[in-house]
Amino acid sequence: MTADKFRCLALAIPGALESSHMNHPDFRIAGKIFASLGYPDQQHAMVNLTPEQQSQFIKNAPDAFSPCAGAWGKRGATSILLSSAKAALVRSALQAASKNITATKPAGQ
């Protein structure tokens, strides 16, 4: 997986746009970030998963997926080592992350 391939997969998500935050590219839907490139360095990307989703991706590909540092990682922010990641799993992670921010909450929540 390359950064360019990650970018293509992220932008293939319906409604996704590329922007920038903290000096690295990010990918948003309706202004909400679901993924980014270059965090914590140029060999990595990040997807915003739920803790349960994060656990499953780490279980399936521990060489490619790991929690981001600190509380952010405990909440599901997941680092992807691009050189170890397979496109199909990255696509699935991006789809999950995008659905997490586009899912509608029940009334009253």
Image (cartoon, helix red, strand yellow):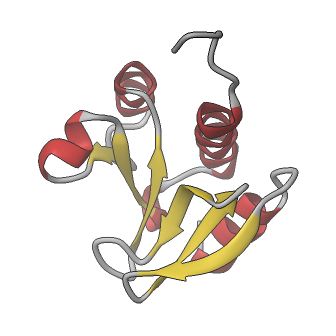
Q: Residue at the front extreme?
A: 108
Q: Residue at x 78, y 64 (%)?
A: 11
Q: Residue at x 46, y 67 (%)?
A: 83
Relative image position of residue 37 (x, y in whole percent): 49, 73
Residue 3 vertical placement versus 30 (above, below): below
Residue 19 vertical placement versus 106 (above, below): below
Q: Residue at x 59, y 74 (%)?
A: 2
- Residue 4 in the figure: left or right of residue 8: left
- Residue 11 in the figure: left or right of residue 34: right
The image quadrant where one finds the N terminus is bottom right
Q: Quadrant of residue 62?
A: top left
- Residues 68 and 58: in front is 68
**Number of marks drawn:** 0
- Residue 73 in the figure: left or right of residue 80: left
Q: Residue at x 60, y 48 (%)?
A: 90
Relative image position of residue 66 (x, y in whole percent): 29, 45
Relative image position of residue 93 (x, y in whole percent): 58, 40
Residue 80 vertical placement versus 88 (above, below): below
Q: Quadrant of residue 101?
A: top right
Residue 77 vertical placement versus 103 (above, below): below
Relative image position of residue 99 (x, y in whole percent): 68, 33
Q: Residue at the bottom extreme?
A: 23
